[in-house]
Image (spheres, rainbow, N blue to C red):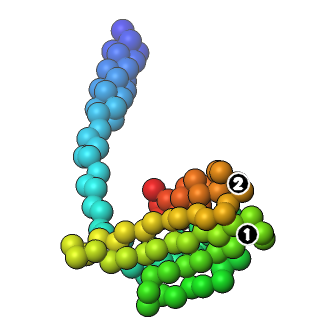
Amino acid sequence: MKTFLIRLALATGCAAALTVSGCAYYPYPVATSAPASFDRSFGAAAGALRDQGLDISVEDRSSGTIVGRIGGAGTVTASVRQQADGSVRVQFDASGARDPGLIDRVSRSYDSRMGR
């Protein structure tokens, strides 16, 4: 009888410990998003062009312009502009590109470099 009571006490204690340990409180993570800086955006845009095999012919930080060429297959221009509200606007334009998916791949590469 004594052995039975000891086993019952141990089983009850283990069950209680498992029940309590199974309860956890995980608060929602606080999302903080700071606006992207001009320098980070400019670097990511230049890197995105390089990622897709474009040779950079113009990289003018003061005007926010990056021009990349891919052989004779066209040109992609990235324009990085600081907005009045402090945000940064990045625009990619392609001219003479024979590859219709090039601009989309550049944009996805930029998003990846920006952590999006």
Q: Residue furthest right?
A: 71
Q: Secondary structure at mark 2?
A: loop
The number of callouts visible is 2
Q: Earlier in the sequence, mark 2 or mark 1?
A: 1
Image position, residue 22 (x, y; %)? 34, 32
Q: Is residue 22 left or right of residue 96?
A: left
To which quarter of the image does residue 51 belong? bottom right
Q: Secondary structure at mark 1?
A: loop
For disc 1, the marked residue is 70
Q: Amino acid at mark 1?
A: Ile
Foreground of the two, 19 or 111: 111
Q: Is residue 72 left or right of residue 24?
A: right
Q: Residue furthest front?
A: 96
Image position, residue 12 (x, y; %)? 32, 20
Q: Residue at x 29, y 38 (%)?
A: 24
Foreground of the two, 20 or 116: 116
Foreground of the two, 82 or 72: 72
Quadrant where the C terminus is found in the figure: bottom left
Q: Residue at x 78, y 70 (%)?
A: 71
Residue 96, disc: none
For disc 2, the marked residue is 99
